[in-house]
C-alpha cells in the first residue's frame, strides 16, 4: 500500500476543520500548483477519504459499512500512534496477545516487537504480515474474507478464537457513544470481537476521538465491561467507566 504524501495528509487535516475547500484555496494554503492539488484530490477521492466537488473538495460524510483496512491505515495516523504508545504500558514479556482486524490495533506492533517470547494472534492478514516482518511469532486466525478485505471472520474464525485464551486483547471499533456503548456496522467482525473479549484475560479498547459520540448498528460491549480504554484525547462523558489512559 502506498502511503499518503505529507501534502495529502495536510489536505485531509484542513478538511477536518473547514469541511470544504476550493482548489484555489488549497493551492495558496499549501504553496502548490492547482494541477498538483487536483491530482491529490483525485487520489484521495479514489481512497474514499473525501468527495470532490466542482472546483474543490469536501470532507467525506459518514460511510456505510466497513472502510477497507488499507484506507483506514491512512487515516488519523498520528492519533493511532499516540494511542499505541500509551497502550504499550500493558505489554510485558511472554504474553499471548490478540489483535483484532482494526487498523488501530496494528499500530501496536512496533511496541510489541521488542518484547521476548511474545506471540501475536490476529484476524487481519495485513497485520499478520507486518508482525512477521517485525520478527514476532505470529498466528493468523483462519476464516473467510470480510467483504473482500484482508480481514477474516466467519465460522472458522469463530471456532479458532473460541478456543484461545490470550493474556491481552487490543481491539477497536467504529463507534463509542457518551453512555460508553461500543458498536460497529459489520456484524461478522462484531461477533468475532465479542468472542475475543469473552476469552481474553485483559481487554483494552483503542479509540481515536473521531469515533466519539457515535453509534453504529451492532452493539459490541460497554466500557464498563472492559479493563481499560486508551484515547488520543480526553472524553469526559465516559470517565470512571473503566481505567482510561
Image (cartoon, rainbow, N blue to C red):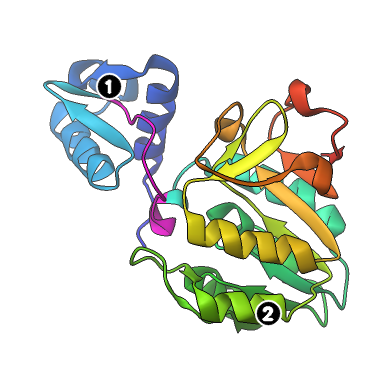
Q: Quadrant of residue 122?
A: bottom right
Query: What secondary structure predominates along the stretch shown in magenta?
Result: loop
Asked whether residue 133 is in view, the answer is no
* Residue 137: image location, x then y, percent: 69, 84
* Residue drawn at x 24%, y 31% as measured from the top left: 51
Q: What stretch is highlighted in magenta?
A: 58-71
Q: Residue at x 36, y 38 (%)?
A: 63
Q: How crowded is mark 2: few (under 14 residues within 10 Å), some or many (20 or more)?
A: many
Count how many numbered circles sit on residues in the image. Answer: 2
Q: Mark 2 points at which residue?
A: 136
Residue 88 left/right relative to 53: right
User: Quadrant location of residue 83?
Assistant: top right
Residue annotated with mark 1 = 26
Q: Where is residue 53 in the image (x, y as percent from the top left)?
A: 16, 24
Residue 41 in which image quadrant: top left
Residue 151: give x, y in percent of width and height.
Answer: 47, 67
Mark 1 vs mark 2: in front: 2
Q: What element carries label 2?
A: loop
Residue in the picture at 58% in, 79% down: 141
Callout 1 secondary element = helix
Front residue (pair 83, 5): 83
Vertical side of 188 occupied by 182: above or below: above
Is 44 positioned to the left or the right of 17 in the image? left
The C terminus - image quarter = top right
Amino acid at each position: 500500500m502506498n502511503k499518503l504524501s505529507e501534502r495529502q495528509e495536510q489536505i485531509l487535516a484542513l478538511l477536518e476543520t473547514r469541511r470544504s475547500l476550493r482548489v484555489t484555496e488549497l493551492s495558496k494554503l499549501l504553496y502548490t500548483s492547482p494541477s498538483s492539488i487536483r491530482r491529490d484530490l483525485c487520489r484521495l477521492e479514489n481512497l474514499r477519504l473525501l468527495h470532490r466537488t466542482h472546483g474543490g473538495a469536501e470532507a467525506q460524510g459518514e460511510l456505510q459499512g466497513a472502510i477497507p483496512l488499507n484506507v483506514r491505515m491512512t487515516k488519523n495516523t498520528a492519533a493511532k500512534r499516540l494511542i499505541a504508545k500509551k497502550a504499550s504500558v500493558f505489554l510485558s514479556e511472554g504474553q499471548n496477545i490478540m489483535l483484532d482486524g482494526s487498523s488501530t490495533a496494528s499500530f501496536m506492533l512496533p511496541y510489541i516487537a521488542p518484547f521476548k517470547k511474545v506471540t501475536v494472534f490476529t484476524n487481519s492478514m495485513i497485520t499478520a504480515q507486518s508482525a512477521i516482518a517485525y520478527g514476532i511469532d505470529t498466528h493468523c486466525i483462519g476464516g473467510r474474507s470480510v467483504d473482500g478485505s484482508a480481514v477474516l471472520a466467519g465460522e472458522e474464525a469463530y471456532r479458532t478464537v473460541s478456543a484461545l485464551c490470550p493474556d491481552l486483547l487490543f481491539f477497536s471499533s467504529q463507534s463509542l457513544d457518551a453512555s460508553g456503548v461500543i458498536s460497529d456496522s459489520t456484524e461478522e467482525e462484531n461477533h468475532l470481537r465479542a468472542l475475543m473479549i469473552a476469552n481474553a484475560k485483559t481487554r483494552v479498547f483503542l479509540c481515536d476521538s473521531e469515533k466519539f459520540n457515535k453509534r453504529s448498528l451492532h452493539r459490541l460491549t460497554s466500557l464498563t465491561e472492559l479493563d481499560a480504554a486508551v484515547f488520543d484525547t480526553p472524553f469526559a462523558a465516559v470517565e470512571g467507566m473503566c481505567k482510561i489512559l
